[in-house]
Image (cartoon, rainbow, N blue to C red):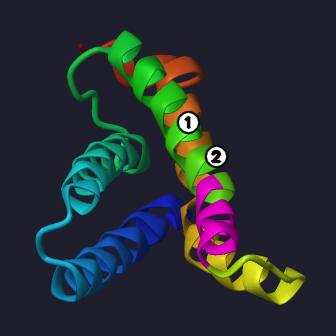
Amino acid sequence: MKWKIYFWVIVFYQIGIVSYLSYSDPKSLIIGIGSIFDIIFVIGLFGYSYRKPILKKSLWMIVFIASILVYVNGLIVSPYNFYVAFGTIEFETIATLWIPFLPLLAIPYALFQYSKNSDEVWQCN
């Protein structure tokens, strides 16, 4: 039940983030690429939360690895970009830049569980 609630929280969170970013910079290619990753991650989260097999189990392991790369990149690149732009960075700034990632940190865990430890889901597929 908690994963279903988490799924819906993330859906609304992602809608809010994408809406805000699209409004603030509607022509950004990065937003479009990020949105595609977000949609794929949320589809995997749906499959895990509702115990539904979607596509192939091996695909979700690849998506899990991609989610790790995307989130690590975001956690490293956003403070670095701030430092490049302003020449300095403080702990409070890093914390503020990382806050949007906090609700998303359970997604790689769910994708891993979905691809590796959910054999009962994949038996019917």
Q: Quadrant of residue 110?
A: top right
Q: Residue 112: which numbered mark, if any?
A: none
Residue 90 drawn at (x, y percent)? 85, 83
Residue 92 drawn at (x, y percent)? 82, 88
Residue 109 appears left or right of 121:
right
Q: CA distance from mark 1 to mark 2?
A: 5 Å
Q: Quadrant of residue 32?
A: bottom left
Residue 88 appears left or right of 34:
right
Instruction: State the residue in front, 35 or 28.
Output: 28
Q: Residue 69: which numbered mark, if any?
A: 1
Does residue 82 lie above or below 53 as drawn?
A: below
Q: Quadrant of residue 102?
A: bottom right
Does residue 49 lie above or below 82 as drawn?
A: above
- Determine crowd level at label 2: few under 14, some 14-19, many 20+ residues with C-alpha closer than 10 A: few
- Determine crowd level at label 1: few under 14, some 14-19, many 20+ residues with C-alpha closer than 10 A: few
Specify the segment rendered in magenta: 77-85
Look at 67% across and 61% down and name the residue there: 80
Residue 11 appears left or right of 58:
left
Look at 31% across and 79% down and name the residue there: 12
Give the residue type at disc 2. Val
- The quarter of the image holding the C terminus is top left
Look at 42% across and 41% down and name the residue there: 48
Q: Is residue 74 magenta?
A: no
Furthest residue toward front = 87
Q: Residue 72: which numbered mark, if any?
A: 2
Q: Are marks 1 and 2 in contact (CB under 8 Å)?
A: yes
Q: Secondary structure at mark 1?
A: helix
Give the residue type at disc 1. Leu
Does residue 7 lie above or below 66 as drawn?
A: below
Q: Secondary structure at mark 2?
A: helix
Residue 121 drawn at (x, y percent)? 39, 25
Chief secondary structure of the magenta portion: helix
